[in-house]
Image: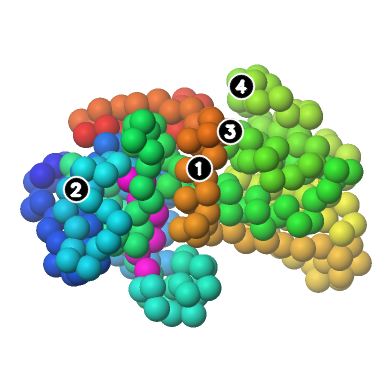
Amino acid sequence: MRAVQVVGYHRPVEFADVPDPVVTHPLDAVVRIAGAGICRTDLHILEGELDAAFHPALPYTLGHENAGYVTAVGDAVDGLAVGDPVIVHPAVTCGWCAACRSGATMHCPTWRFPGVDGWGGGYADYMLTSARSLVKLGPRTDPADVAPHADAGLTAIHAIKRLAPFLGPRSTVALIGFGGLGHLAVQLLRIYTTARVVVVDASPERLKWAEAYAPDGVAEDVAGLPPVDAVLDLVGEHGVPQEAFAALRKGGVYAVVGYGGDLRLELLDMINRELTVLGNQIGTHSELAELMTLADQGRIRLETRRFPLDDVAHALAEVAAGRVLGRAVLVP
């Protein structure tokens, strides 16, 4: 089958002809990819920025936002059948540890991260995963339409549900970065909180796009805002974390999703202002199922731009240049 692989850092991706994945474990599942979302993490991977965290053996197939159709399952799999439309949770976990049994699947100490840690991802015709990672979609859902929810939507819902207990109807949250993840986050903030939402982005084009989602305000720079109760930082680099932290009023919460930058914490300042920092990873399997229910009900809209898998180099360049307002999806 065709697969788009990272073959070296600071190098373009390359197509490879690799064997079709096959079921070898009773809980395995093979998915025919209908759509694979492009995440900025994929760009970070190509620059070698995740090598220290995962040490993947190269080459391997990219893609951790995947959805498609089941083509094979292991003997122990129940509730899934060949032909079922599914979205793929990005983590493969053991199912037995304390984290998995408590529902915090992304904290499994033996987890794997297909498309990121060296396990083959979904920039391909097919991918191998665990049946435990699959969420069945409604029969009228096109998997390619929802594929980016496997990370973009999942990360947003997880971060917002963690932030929600800190927010009330008199709260203001600044959402920094309005793109593929940000346009989902503003909708989820409306569903899970009663807070005022101010969208912050340096791009006038993106702020204009944000107005379609009816935020309570927009701004080009978080430093120009009055103090806010919470910041949801979807950027996490270029000096944004420090500015975001400074924008918090006493008792404020800094919820960070984006990465690549750094934040210098002064402990006396944290104590005096009694600040909270929330780091956010991907969400849980149950949160992905909940998100798919919201999407099926039409309560959350995901804007996508499709590219043929053969056009992956152009798609990556468009994402890197910020010319994709929603989420880019590769279609084999």
User: Disc 2 marks which residue?
Assistant: 82
User: Disc 4 marks which residue?
Assistant: 209
Seen in the picture, residue 44 relative to 181 is either above or below; the reply is below
Residue occupying the point 52% across, 49% down: 290
Q: Tell me if mark 2 has few (under 14), some (14-19) or many (20+) residues whose alpha carbon lies within 10 angstroms of its own.
A: few
Task: Give how far across and how far down residue 220 sits, in percent.
Answer: 72, 30
Which residue range is magenta in the image? 86-93
Q: Magenta segment: does it hold 39?
A: no
Give amino acid for label 2: Val
User: Disc 1 marks which residue?
Assistant: 293
| Disc number lying in front (4 or 2) | 2
Comparing 179 with 215, the one in front is: 215
Circles 1 and 4 in contact, beta carbons < 8 Å: no
Give amino acid for label 3: Arg
Q: Tell me if mark 4 has few (under 14), some (14-19) or many (20+) residues whose alpha carbon lies within 10 angstroms of its own.
A: some
Seen in the picture, residue 228 relative to 23 is either above or below; the reply is above
Q: Residue 299 shows which numbered tag?
A: 3
Kind of element beneath mark 3: loop
Q: Chief secondary structure of the magenta span?
A: loop
Comparing 123 with 319, the one in front is: 123
Q: Tell me if mark 1 has few (under 14), some (14-19) or many (20+) residues whose alpha carbon lies within 10 angstroms of its own.
A: some
Q: On the image, which quarter does residue 111 sit in? A: bottom left
Circles 4 and 2 in contact, beta carbons < 8 Å: no
Is 327 displayed left or right of 21 in the figure? right
Task: Say whether disc 1 or disc 3 marks the residue closer to the N-terminus.
Answer: 1
Kind of element beneath mark 1: helix
Give amino acid for label 4: Trp
Task: Say whether disc 1 or disc 4 marks the residue closer to the N-terminus.
Answer: 4
Tell me the CA gap for discs 1 and 4: 25 Å
